[in-house]
Amino acid sequence: MVFSSSSFTLLTLFIVISTVCARPQSYAIWAADSGIQRQQGNGLGGDGNPDVSYEHGEFQWGLRQLYERTGEEKYFEYIKNGVDNIVFGNGTVHGNYRLSDFSLDPVRTGPSFLYLLGKTGERKYQIAADIFKSQLDSHPRTAQGQFWHKLRYPNQGWLDGIYMGDIFYADYTKRFQPDNATAWDDIAKQFTLMYQNALQNATAPNNLHLLYHGYDFSHQKVWASPDRGHSPEVWDRALGWFSMALVDILETFPQDHPGYQSILSILQDIVPHIRDAADPSTGVWWLVMTQPGRERNYFESSGGAMFVYSMLKSLRLGFVKDTKDGSIARAAKKAYGYMTENWVVEKQDGTMDWLNTVIVGSLDQTGDFDYYVSQGLRVNDLKGLAAFLLASLEIERL
Ligand SMILES: *[C@@H]1O[C@H](CO)[C@@H](O)[C@H](O)[C@H]1NC(C)=O
Ligand SMILES: *[C@@H]1O[C@H](CO)[C@@H](O)[C@H](O)[C@H]1NC(C)=O
Ligand SMILES: *[C@@H]1O[C@H](CO)[C@@H](O)[C@H](O)[C@H]1NC(C)=O
């Protein structure tokens, strides 16, 4: 057999590429190692100052599962270094955290404090967790009892806030006050109030039987609907946060408390509708889910990765029963296949890039279609990369 020079060149190129980019067999490991190599989620902001950031908490949630799976100390050390960048030796949470902001966002780092407390017994992590709990104890609420998303967003419940605040609230309660029925009631209520106030009704335009991004109980905000004060669109990442909160909290919530059933019912209600909202040809989800195919709308990656995680974890833990033909698992796998084909890019240095995650989606402005589609995308945005890590962890457990 004679090699033509062109096939020889191709062969050489192939060998070079496969040695330089010796990417791990596991997408979870690849995503985690790539983020770590870029120093993402390490408790510091782009300016090098401490940053108490929910997306670091989200990434750490994935790293700790990877640590439990692989036993690789480097993942544990990365979580610990990240948290030690935002917690002083005396337990004070520093960086940009201010209790008086009454923002739920930073509280999403709290589960990492409790995790490290469990692993190391170091008192500073308890002090830091107590600070977050004291925020929740005096956190402003709607008349119905929903935590405001932030002090500067009065009377507003956002889906995002459920993920940011209540995973920690439940972790904390389980560890320190497992018999506090008032606390478990309160946690369940955060979910049911959000569901009642934000679920699309049957006559809503573009009804997918999913949840709007948020609601304003006082109906003051420009986007508040006349009926229940909800925002106008279903935004994929907000629903992604909420769906992850449902599956993550059910692992912690006591099964013999009635709130467990309430939360479980919400999960069982929405998972099939998330499946049905996927684009039939690609299997992934529109940024503005209520406006499929509309010009300027596009397939966004962070929300989709969150859905894959939530769907597969729901099935794995038996929270949701799949249909006879396995349509939920199939939908999750199809979406995941699209993600690895289209949104994971191998780089020369062996790391991966993660594409198509929108940087922000907030209800501080108009909350309408134009607002969402005008926000920029960022390569390796940690909200999306961490969600891909979580989705990959579930895929790799199948
Ligand atoms: C904790 O330590 C930091 C840094 O030394 C300091 O600024 C802060 O005031 C201390 N907090 C308390 C409660 O002592
Ligand atoms: C029980 O939980 C509620 C709500 O979080 C809290 O206000 C109360 O202090 C807790 N009670 C005890 C005994 O810890
Ligand atoms: C259903 O939702 C739409 C849109 O928010 C609203 O206009 C309508 O009044 C609602 N109907 C009921 C029965 O709540």
Image: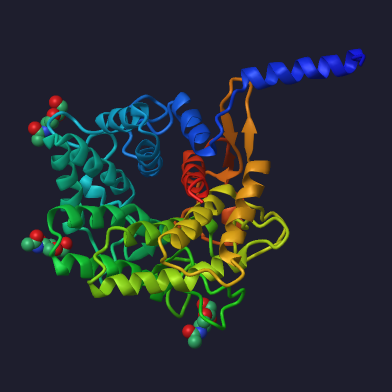
Image quadrant in which you'd find residue 69:
top left
Q: Residue furthest front?
A: 1
Task: Please state which of residues 384 and 262 is positioned toward the viewer in this rendering.
Answer: 262
Residue 372 percent location from the top left of the image: 57, 54
Q: Position of residue 394 (x, y in %)?
A: 48, 49
Residue 111 lies, in percent from the top left, at: 27, 46
Q: Is residue 119 above or below residue 138?
A: above
Q: Is residue 151 visible?
A: no
Instruction: Please give the name of the residue rendered at 29% of the width and 27% of the height, measured from the top-left corner.
Output: 81
Left or right? Give the position of 221 relative to 99: right
In this picture the colour scheme is: rainbow
Q: Would you identify the image quadrant in which residue 61 lies?
A: top left
Q: Residue at x 56, y 53 (%)?
A: 304
Above or below — where is 256 with respect to 312?
below
Give the percent coordinates (x, y) of residue 397.
48, 48
Is 375 situated left or right of 54 in this image?
right
Q: Quadrant of the rendered structure where residue 268 is?
A: bottom left
Q: Is residue 151 above or below residue 110?
A: below
Q: Nearer the viewer, residue 235 or 254?
A: 254
Q: Quadrant of the N terminus?
A: top right
Identify the residue at horizontal 66%, vertical 53% (top origin).
298
